[in-house]
Image (spheres, rainbow, N blue to C red):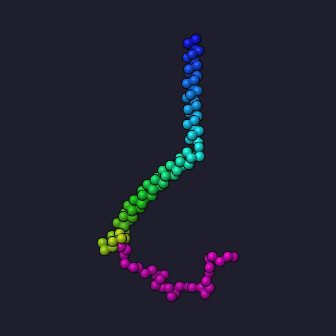
Amino acid sequence: MFRRAFWFTAGAAAGVWATTKVNRQLKKLTPESLAAQAADKAVEAGHRLKDFALDVKAGMTQREDELNDALGLHQDPDRSDNVTALPGPRRLRAIENSKTTYRPKFSYDRNEDH
């Protein structure tokens, strides 16, 4: 008799446990729950993307400082917008000899359909 009562109680407990698990899973699969999960994932992805962009920006700034030091470009203290000062203007040979360069009499439009 006690054996039957034990197995009856064990079966009832297993049934309650299984029913509870199934109901929890069903609640997770409702449209509202799925929408909330998707929104949470989107917010999390946005935070990760923001962190990545900040890391890239910090790396870019560091590399730009390294390149400025290597090229001898230094910050201009008169500029308040933190723009590096470039060396004096240079004239290229192609610009200086622009009178001797060949220029066709027609213009070619790359966007023209053929």
Relative to 97, is 70 above or below? above
Of 112 and 100, nearer the camera is 112
Q: Is residue 102 magenta?
A: yes
Q: Does the rendering let one see residue 70?
A: no
Indicate the position of residue 33 as horizontal and vertical percent values.
55, 45
Query: Which residue is found at the position 50% from the left and 49% from the top?
Result: 40
Of 9 and 88, nearer the camera is 9
Query: Which residue is found at the position 53% from the left and 48% from the top?
Result: 36
Relative to 108, is 27 above or below? above
Indicate the position of residue 27 as horizontal and vertical percent values.
57, 40
Task: Tell which residue pokes out farthest to the top in this image.
Answer: 1
Q: Is residue 18 magenta?
A: no
Query: Which quadrant of the figure contains the C terminus?
Result: bottom right
Of 30 and 94, nearer the camera is 30
Which quadrant of the view contains residue 71? bottom left
Question: Range of the magenta residues?
Answer: 85-114
Query: Which residue is found at the position 59% from the left and 46% from the top?
Result: 31
